[in-house]
Amino acid sequence: MIRILLVDDHELVRTGFEALLNAADDMTVVGVAQSGEEAVSAVVKLSADVVLMDVNMPGIGGVEACRRILRHDPAVKIIAISALNDGPIPQQLLKIGVMGFISKGSSLEEMVLAIKKVMAGKRYLCTEVANNMALQGLPGSIESPFAKLSQREGEVVTLILQGKTIQEMAEMLVLSDKTVNTYRYRLYEKLHVKNDVELTRLAVKFGHMIPD
């Protein structure tokens, strides 16, 4: 039996996914979480085999939650779920060890297939993500400037776009205020922006803003 942890900040989504997956063969939902922080704690307590992780959530968010979970236990299979299928997020998640990425518009059949694939040790990308990643770097394509950022800088960007203060970011990322500020101004330089307003405009332009 595949033990699944559902992570999403929308109760309706969690309830729907839970009912559908519990009805599937050889799968059971052993727990649900509504934030990245809850997910990190729940993985340890529940010994889940697969985590279905919403990317855009309040708090530390899905990307940072994935990083912390995999740092604690690299054997956990994580499938990210997002409404945004382009931009640097999918590639960033794959680099830190996430095994799958599917769209929120995916069917139950595709979700079940993704779970079975990652349990077999294989990566799974929905068609939209696979196509977008294949097109990156081709002549005529425009690379997102956010692809230049390090993993930690990407996490800081996500929290800035969520409207978090320096103190809140420091607490969520377990860093000092000074270190967060260093990352912030370093990513400003890389992205050639002067403030959070310009950063937000750039994020919108390149599809880096993750919709709810």
Image: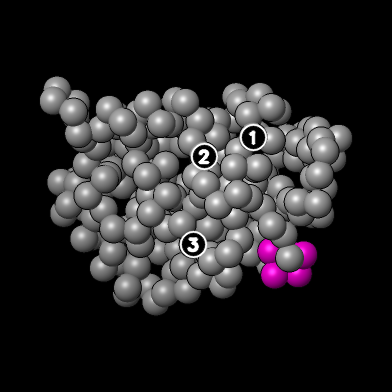
* Badge number at residue 67: 3
Upstream in the sequence, badge 3 or badge 2? 3
Q: Residue at 23% across / 60% down in the picture?
A: 185
Q: Position of residue 20 (x, y in %)?
A: 80, 33
Q: Nearer the viewer, mark 3 or mark 2?
A: 2
Q: Nearer the viewer, residue 93 or 148?
A: 93
**Element on which disc 1 rests:** helix
Tally the numbered discs. Answer: 3
* Badge number at residue 124: 2
Res. 158 visible in picture: no
| Callout 2 amino acid | Tyr
Q: CA distance from mark 1 to mark 2?
A: 9 Å
Q: Position of residue 120 (x, y in %)?
A: 60, 49
State which region is magenta. 42-46
User: Quadrant location of residue 175?
Assistant: bottom left
Crowding at dot 2, Cα within 10 Å, few <14 / some 14-19 / many 20+, comes out as many
Report if residue 188 lies within the magenta region: no
